[in-house]
Image (tube, helix red, strand yellow):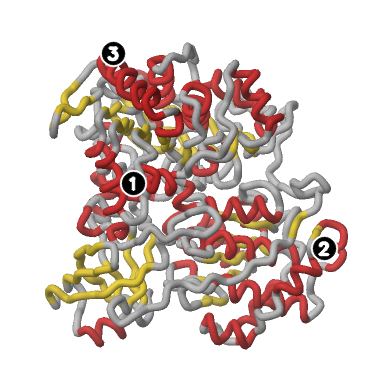
Amino acid sequence: ASMRDSRIKKTKTVCTYCGVGCSFEVWTKGRHILKVEPSEEAPVNGVSTCVKGKWGWDFVNSQERLTKPLIRQGDEFVEATWDEAMNYIAHHLGSVKEQFGPDSIGYIASSKCSNEENFIFQKFARAVMGTNNVDNCARYCQTPASKALLRTVGYGGDSGTIQDIQSAGLVIIIGANTAESHPVLATRIKRAHKLHGQKLIVSDLRTNEMAERADIHLHPKHSTDLIWLNAVTKYIIDQGWEAREYIQQRVNGYDEFVQSLQKYTLEFAEETTGISKETLIQVATMIHESDSTCILWAMGVTQHKGGTDTSTAICNLQLVTGNFGKPGTGAYPLRGHNNVQGACDFGTQPNVFPGYESVEDDEIRGRYERAWGVELPKHTGYNNHEMVDAIMEGKIKAMYLFGEDMALVDANANLVDEAFSKLQFFIVQDVFFSRTARYADVILPAAPSLEKDGTFTNTERRIQRFYQVFEPMGDSKPDWEIIQMVANAMGANWNYKHPSEIMDEASVLAPLFAGVSYERLEGWNSQVWPVQLDGTDTPLLYQDSFNFPDGKAKLFPVDWTPPHAYDQQYDLHINNGRLLEHFHEGNMTYQSEGLKHKAPRAWLEVSPELAIERGISDGAIVRLTSPEGSIKLPVLVTNRVKGNELYLPMNTDSRNEAINFLTSSDHDQVTDTPNYKETAVSMEVLSYD
Ligand code: SF4
C-alpha cells in the first residue's frame, strides 16, 4: 500500500468557484485527479464542500485548453512561440501607445486570478504603461456594495466572518440565491436555523431554496428593496427601537438621516413594494427582538440602477440598530467569484491603488512613485463600462484582458461585440478559447489555479494560500509570469521569481496588508485583512471604531430610483441568477463532464399562471426579445416564479441562450454596474411543448 500511496500527491488548494473560499486537499497521481479531500483544519469550510468544489476540476485536463500562444492572421489564429508573441505585442501595443498615448489602452483584470496577479497587472497598467484604465469584473457585480460600505462604515468588505453569520440571532438575505451561489455558507445558515433557533428572512423575487426555508419570505415587486428597507428603518425609529446610545457615540448624520426617511411610511412601502404593512412590522419587530442581525446580499440588490443606494440602505439599517462591530452582526455582500474581493483589494480598479487608496491623492501616489521609480498617472481611469463606450468613441484603441469572458458577461453583449471588433489591437489571456478570444489579435495561454502558486481572498476578507499541483499544460504559463513577460516586452525590467515576492511588495506598499506574508499563510493558515505589521488580523471589523478619521460611521440618506416602466411591447420582467452546478459563464464548468451532465443547458422559468395564459408547458420553445436583442430557449413551468416574472440561469455556454443578449447598457448611477436585473422582454412562443 505504501508504494501506491507514495505516488499519490496531496496538495492544498482553495476552491475557485465562489467567494466562500473553501479549501481542501487535491489528491493526484500524475495528471489524474483522484479526489478532493476537505480537512477539519480548513478555516472556512472544515469538512464540507459543494458539488463544484468536489467535482469541478477535470477542466484542467481538457483537450480544449489553450496550450500555445496564438497570433491572428486574417480570420485564422496561428500557433506561435512565446518570443514571437512577445515581439508581436511589443510592436503593436507599443505603437498604439506611441501614436495615441497611454490612456488609449484599457486593461481588464480577472477576479478568478490571484491577488498577486492582480497586483502586478495594475502595476503594469500604471507604472509601465502610464494609465489608470484598469478594472475587473467586480464592476459587474459588487462594486455598488463596496461603494455603500465605503460611504457608511469605511471598509469595502464584509464586516465580519462566516462564523458571525452562523452565530447571528437573525439573518436577512436580500437578492441572493445563497443555496446555489454560496452553497457551503448556505449550509451554515440552514443548520443554525434548523438547530439553533436562528431566524431567517429572505427577500427575493423568486422562491429559491432559502426563501422556502425562511421564517418570512418577502416578495417585493422588482427593484423596490430600497423602499421596504427604508420603511422598516423608519418604523424602527418611530417605535423608539433605534440603538440610541450606539448612534450617539459612534454614528454621524442621524438627524438628517431621520429627515430623509419621511416619505418611507408603511403605507407608501405597501403600495410600491406590494409587501403588506403587517409583514413589514413583523420584519421590524424581528430585528428589534434579535440581539444580533446580519444582512447578506448579492446581485439581486446591486445590479440595478439604484444598486449602490439600496446597498447603502442596508448599511443604514444596520447602523440604526447597532448591528456593526459586535459578534454576529454586520453587512455582508456575498462575493461571487473566488477572488472578486482580492482583485479589488489588490488595486485592479481605476480609482484606487491596492488597499483602496486613492490614485488622486498626492501623498499616496508619491509612495508608489518612489517605490516604483516612475511618475504615475494622476487621474482616475476608465472603468470597464466606460472602456466599452470609449472604444465606440475611438478613444480606446487597444486592450489587454486576462481571465475574463467580457463578451459574454458584460451586459448588452451585442454592443460589446461591436466594440471589440473595433479595437486595433487586443490581447486576450485565458485558459480556454473564450467568446472574447474570437476578437483577439494575440491569445496567450494561461494556467489555472491548480498549475500555479498564489493567494485568493474570500468574501470574508480572508487571504488563503493555494499551492501548485501540476505543471502548466503545454506552453501555458501562470498569469503572473505572462504579465511579467508582457511588462518586460514593454520595457520593464521585472524579475519576480515567485508570487511570494509580489505579495512582499504589496504588503510594504499597502498598509491594509502590512503583516501579510507567505510564511504566515503557510498550509491551512489564513489572514483576514486589515493585517497589522505584527501579523494581527481582523476577522470582525469596527469593534472600536469605523474606518473614518473620527472613527464614526456615517448614515447616508438614499432615495429610491424607479425602474423602467413596462410597456405593452415588453410586458414581462426577466430576472437571472446562478445554478448550483455551474460557475459564471460556464467556460470552466461546462468543460467538466460531471457538471455538464447534471445541468447540460439553460432553461427559462415561467410561472404556472403565465404558462396557462400563454398556453405553454414544460419544453415549449420561446423567443425572448428586448430592445437590445433576442434569445431562444426551452421553458420550465415552476411556482418558484410568480406572475409576469421570468427567470433565466445566467450560466450557459450557448450564445443563443445567454441573458446578456437581452440586457441593456443601463447602469447603476453611482458605480456604472450594469442593471442586469431590470430587463423587460416580450415572449413569443415558437413551439408549444
Ligand atoms: Fe467552492 Fe463555493 Fe462550493 Fe465552497 S461553496 S466548494 S468555495 S463553490
Question: Spatial distance from mark 1 to mark 3, Cα to Cα?
Answer: 32 Å
Residue 247 is marked as 2
Residue lying furthest front in this view? Answer: 99
- Check if mark 1's residue and mark 3's residue have beta carbons within 8 Å: no
When the figure is inspected, residue 392 is found, relative to residue 286, above or below; the finding is above
**Could you tell me which quadrant the C terminus lies in?**
bottom left
Query: Mark 1 or 3, which is nearer the eye?
Result: 1
Q: Earlier in the sequence, mark 1 or mark 2?
A: 2
Q: Nearer the viewer, residue 47 or 111?
A: 111
The residue labelled by disc 1 is 392
Say what amino acid the circle numbered 2 marks: Ile
Q: What residue is at 60 percent from the left and 55 percent from the top? A: 332
Question: Spatial distance from mark 2 to mark 3, Cα to Cα?
Answer: 61 Å
Quadrant assignment, res 57: top left
Q: Position of residue 579 (x, y in %)?
A: 36, 57
Q: Is residue 583 left or right of residue 436?
A: right
Say what amino acid the circle numbered 1 marks: Met
Q: Position of residue 281 (x, y in %)?
A: 66, 82
When the figure is inspected, residue 457 is found, relative to residue 203, above or below; the finding is above
Q: Nearer the viewer, residue 113 or 60?
A: 113
Q: What residue is at 78 percent from the left and 81 percent from the top? A: 239
Residue 176 is marked as none
Whether residue 326 is visible to the viewer of this picture, yes or no, is no
Query: Mark 2 or 3, which is nearer the eye?
Result: 3
The answer to whether the beta carbon of the residue marked 2 is less than 8 Å from any atom of ligand 1 is: no
Say what amino acid the circle numbered 3 marks: Asp
- Number of on-image labels: 3
**Could you tell me which quadrant the N terminus lies in?**
top left
Say which element carries label 1.
helix
Say which element carries label 3.
helix
The residue labelled by disc 3 is 83
Quadrant assignment, res 316: bottom right
